[in-house]
Amino acid sequence: MQGRAGKSIFAGAMSALIFGLTANAAGTASSPGPGLKSAAALITDASNGEVLFERDAGRVVPIASITKLMTALVVLDGQQPLDEKVEITTADRWSGKGAFSRLPVGAKITRGDLLKLALMASENRAAKTLARNYPGGTPAFVRTMNAKAKALGMSRTKFDDPSGLSSNNVSNARDLAKLVTAASRDTRIREFSTLESHAVRAGRSVLTYRNTNLLVGKPDWDILVQKTGFTNDAGECLVMQAMIGDRAVNMVLMNSFGKLTRTADARRVRKWMEAQGEPTVAAATH
């Protein structure tokens, strides 16, 4: 009996040691965390950058249409007239996956409407048209995107195109939290990204678009800025700044399985924070 007891004590001690090493490697966790399904995640206090939860937040991955938040920043920094109409041309087509667009070649749409469609409906052709009509064209636009990323301290980020269809657009959750914070400072990005729907005239047709974020417009959510994204390489992604109680919180959710999972993860974050009252720092151990 004493032999068994000794083995049991030894096994318990080893388990405690392993647990302690694991917790230390991941950062001390005083909370089990929100149980997120996204492969990478970062939850921060938007006012001071305090990390509330993180999982694999440093891994550099494709970011899909999260790109369009940077596209919006560059367009608005350029101070081109938002009421100026620009024409969709064959140069704005994309030949690979994600090529479908409801915007017909030949349509003339204001820069402001294109920006709204890019942000709230993730319209890829709208983003490409905005970049092509930037001084110096798309190459200059992409260079400016990368310069802006550097200025924001997004040291692990690289942009290759304005829509996010290119898998060479990469970043990590820590950098994307900085992007969300920068985007939230512009009232136009806040307004455009959180529109429930928007209609534009394209030739003789009126096209109505809906927000790709299923949480936008829900009465129990106060979303300040948001952007969804999806490609096969990036998976389903969602970044947003939302009020939870009286606290503005940045959420970066990368590579989840299915549109419902990314929004369910956002709900898990809110439920977890509300259950705690004042959130405590937590870190995933995987």
Image: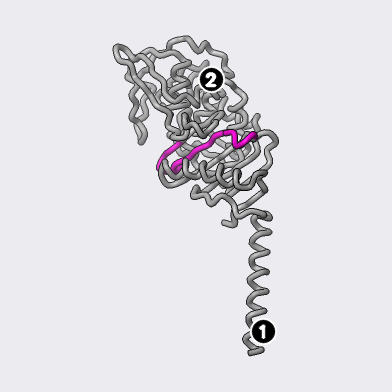
Give percent across and percent down for residue 215.
Answer: 47, 34
Q: Can residue 207 be seen in this view?
A: yes
Give whichever of discs 2 and 1 has the lower sequence position: 1
Q: What residue is shown with label 1? A: 6
Q: What residue is shown with label 2? A: 75
Is residue 84 positioned above or below 19 on the image?
above
> At 64% across and 65% down in the image, what residue appears?
19
Is residue 247 positioned above or below 271 on the image?
above
- Left or right, 28 with respect to 75, comes to right
Pick whichever, 174 or 36, lies toward us: 36
Pick whichever, 165 or 277, lies toward us: 277
Q: Which amino acid does label 1 sit on?
A: Gly
Give the structural element (helix, strand or loop) at label 1.
Answer: helix
- Left or right, 175 with respect to 139, comes to right
Is residue 243 positioned above or below 277 on the image?
above
> At 53% across and 13% down in the image, what residue appears?
80
Q: What residue type is labelled 2?
A: Val
Q: Which colour scheme is used?
A: one colour
Tag of residue 87: none
- Left or right, 241 with respect to 48, comes to left
Q: Does the magenta run of residues contain 231?
A: yes
Magenta range? 229-246
Give percent across and percent down for residue 178.
Answer: 62, 34
Looking at the rendering, in which quadrant would you find the N terminus?
A: bottom right
Label 2 to label 1, Cα distance in Å? 69 Å
